[in-house]
Image (cartoon, grey):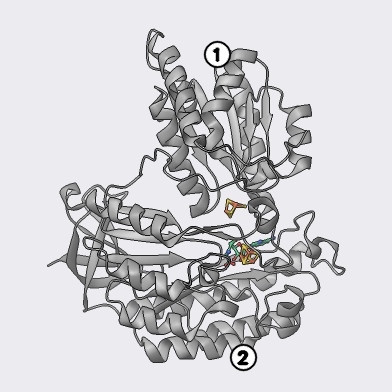
Amino acid sequence: MRTPVTAPSQGELERQNGFMEKIAEINRKKDRKPRFFINTFGCQMNAHDSEKLDGMLRKMGYEPCADEKEADFVLYNTCCVRENAENKVYGNLGFLKHAKKENPDMKIALCGCMMQQPTVIETIRKKYRHVDIVFGTFNIYKLPELIMTNIESSSPVFDIWDNYADIVEDLPTVRKFKYKASVNIMFGCNNFCSYCIVPYVRGRERSRRPGDILSEIRALAADGVKEVMLLGQNVNSYGRGLDEDIDFAGLLRMVNEIDGIERIRFMTSHPKDLSDRLISAMAECDKVCGHIHLPFQAGSNEILKRMNRRYTKEQYLGLVDRIRTAMPDIAITTDIIVGFPGETAADVDETIDVVKKARFNGAFTFIYSKRTGTPAAEMPNMVSEQDAKANFNRLLDAVNPIVEELNQKKVGNTYKVLVDGVSSDPALVTGRTDDNTLVHFKGCRELIGDIVDVKITDSKIFYLIGELQ
Ligand code: SAH
Ligand code: SF4
Ligand code: F3S
């Protein structure tokens, strides 16, 4: 069933363009434009892939719609990092079965990380026969061809690859925001943290060439983009395997030179690869934002070792110190897992100790989810749900007061805020400070995309309230 890895011929993009034109031609003959709906699960990698899928669908003559029941083409871009991400997809697919009964012409396509797992493909073939097109993370650029094959054969199309054949540049992309954009600088991951499925579903680490990245960012700047988010599972190992002699610090300095770009963000940084060269580059580049997302996952050295994170609690805290010495105002956020196999309450005390010492501005906290195929799934002493939850709550009780206190300290100060959108209260707009704190303040939608001064008047646990200056 798995397609062998074949390198796409030269001009793969032109081939797909050909399919896009043919499908656009077919769609032009319909009474009305067919509608599409993309549902994206998971991280920013997936969100960015969805922008490319969106761009291709529009080029093929589809138009977006807000209600998936109304769509002629429904695409789920899936995530499998934790079990509940997968359950959401299966739940929604059950619902789509009914929607398709009402609208038999509806096409359903699935892609993304979850589809890279053979057991998932088996389940879809057996239990979800209403699905029309399935592809993976390595061949999203083939969407036009897969739609064409499905039209011609009117039977389900499955096309999942085991690895990248090539990085296809220049796919049509529809950006969600005019003034900010994500840019992939690398794909895949080589770290194999023992709990994590990502290396298995996103393949080996591959960096894009600096020239390609820089020309993409220059084009974005020319198109009005002020803030770029450089994306990779571990940006700190950027450049490995490239002919050019470049690392992430060098890339940041180059992006910092691009006219029109005002803010540079990146994620994610693996602590084991964070170099002093990067700390200096961050401190010296005026456009690089004062925020770093630096997951530490666990505080116990024994657990860290079994997680295959390749740093100790002491090394992590030392790194936090070096970062804060170079950039005293920087915000540090993190990811933490509770309930890894064999983790005791005493191990979680070590995690809480890191939280208290590092004083994070925010933390994504997760209960360990067993992922079949990863080394941790085979480890003994699964933690009971009850124990994991109790430890999880203890952890939140340590994290939240610190986040609240750090936000409280901002009251009275004025910050530059990039306005992102209208808040749930339509009289308010929301935006982010340079250190990525969320701010709500009175303002109109015309401000969206502007960087404005906002004086902070109040703080809540997870956001600030301010006044436009
Ligand atoms: N590459 C990034 C993170 C990718 S996944 C990094 O290394 O930081 C995002 C977060 O999901 C991870 O940081 C981890 O905290 C969490 N995560 C990954 N696998 C998990 C699992 N099996 N159970 C619970 N949380 C998990
Ligand atoms: Fe997963 Fe670790 Fe790679 Fe992050 S660095 S994607 S947690 S294996
Ligand atoms: Fe991201 Fe989920 Fe895939 S976190 S890389 S979409 S498994």
Amino acid type assigned to the residue bearing label 1 in the image: Asp
**Residue 410, quarter of the rendered image:** bottom left
Circles 2, 1 touching at the beta carbon (< 8 Å): no
Q: Is residue 326 above or below residue 338?
A: below
Label 1 sits on a secondary structure element that is loop
Residue 345 vertical placement versus 212 (above, below): below
Mark 2 sits on what residue?
314
Residue 295 visible in rendering: yes
Name the residue at 27% across, 76% down.
Answer: 286
Position of residue 202 measured from the top left corner of the image (x, y, whole percent): 63, 52
Residue at horizontal 31%, vertical 47%? 177
Compared with 222, 254 (above or below) is below
Q: Which label belongs to residue 37?
A: none
Question: Is the C-beta of the residue carrying label 1 under 8 Å from the nearest atom of ligand 3?
Answer: no
Q: Position of residue 4 (x, y in %)?
A: 73, 39
Quarter-wise, where is residue 361 in the image?
bottom left
Quadrant assignment for the C terminus: bottom left
Task: Report the residue marked by disc 1.
Answer: 105
List x then y, in percent, for residue 265: 38, 66
Q: Secondary structure at mark 2?
A: helix
Tell me if 408 is positioned left or right of 37 in this view: left
Whichever of callouts 2 and 1 sits on the residue coming sooner in the sequence is 1
Split into quadrants, the picture shows ligand 2 in the one at bottom right
**Real-space Cα separation, disc 2 to disc 1, in angstroms:** 59 Å
Q: Residue 253, image x and y in percent?
A: 35, 73
Q: Nearer the viewer, residue 453 or 16?
A: 16
